[in-house]
Amino acid sequence: MIYREAQLTDIPQIQVVRHTVKENTLSNPALVTDADCEDFITRRGKGWVCEINGEVIGFAIVDLQEHNVWALFLRPEYEGKGIGKTLHRLMLNWYFDQSQTNLWLGTAPHTRAERFYGLQGWQTTGIVNKGEVKFEMSYADWLKLTK
């Protein structure tokens, strides 16, 4: 298992992972284009992947411009193995090395993702994006969690 920064050549496999999820699915696969992925991992922020035998099985992307977790997804068969936690940690370590601005994300209510973020120390702060649960992580809270 290898964790590394996402590269442009990973985008096709990132898209495969994104379209295999069982929760937080895209209503229209065309909503997230390869150009979007490129923009987020090269200009707006940064991304990381986890690969096994050369295959991307999970990824995380953070948007430094909007202070937002743009994506954190795993292939369903790899859930519950700590991969999401590692990608999450890599992403937040990088983000808070760049900025001390609160980071936010939205996820569908009553999902494994909602439980995951709560367990990782995120604070529920309201509703965003047509009914998604809005979470925030402050720099101070991240420092406490990493001690």
Image (cartoon, rainbow, N blue to C red):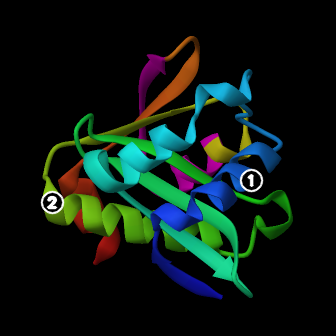
Say left or right for 95 vs 11: left
Pointer 1 local density, CA inside 10 Å: few below 14, some 14–19, many at least 20: some
Q: Is residue 36 above or below residue 50?
A: above
Q: Is residue 114 above or below residue 57?
A: above
Q: Give me the residue at 20% from left, 54% from top.
A: 139
Q: How many marks?
A: 2
Residue nearer the viewer, 78 or 85: 78
Q: Give me the residue at 40% from left, 71% from top.
A: 90
Q: Which residues are magenta?
A: 114-128
Q: Is residue 79 visible?
A: yes
Q: Give me the residue at 38% from left, 46% from top.
A: 40
CA distance for labels 2 and 1 = 29 Å
Say left or right for 76 vs 90: right
Q: Return the mark for residue 98.
A: 2
Q: Give me the residue at 45% from left, 53% from top.
A: 61
**Residue beneath label 1, please?**
16
Asked if the residue at tag 1 contacts the one at tag 2, i.e. Cβ–Cβ closer than 8 Å, the answer is no
Amino acid on which disc 2 is placed: Gln
Q: Return the mark for residue 130.
A: none
Quarter assignment of residue 1: bottom right
Quarter assignment of residue 26: top right
Q: Is residue 109 visible?
A: no
Residue nearer the viewer, 94 or 108: 94
Pointer 2 local density, CA inside 10 Å: few below 14, some 14–19, many at least 20: few
Amino acid on which disc 1 is placed: Val
Q: Position of residue 58 (x, y in %)?
A: 65, 64
Whether residue 126 appears in magenta in the rendering, the answer is: yes
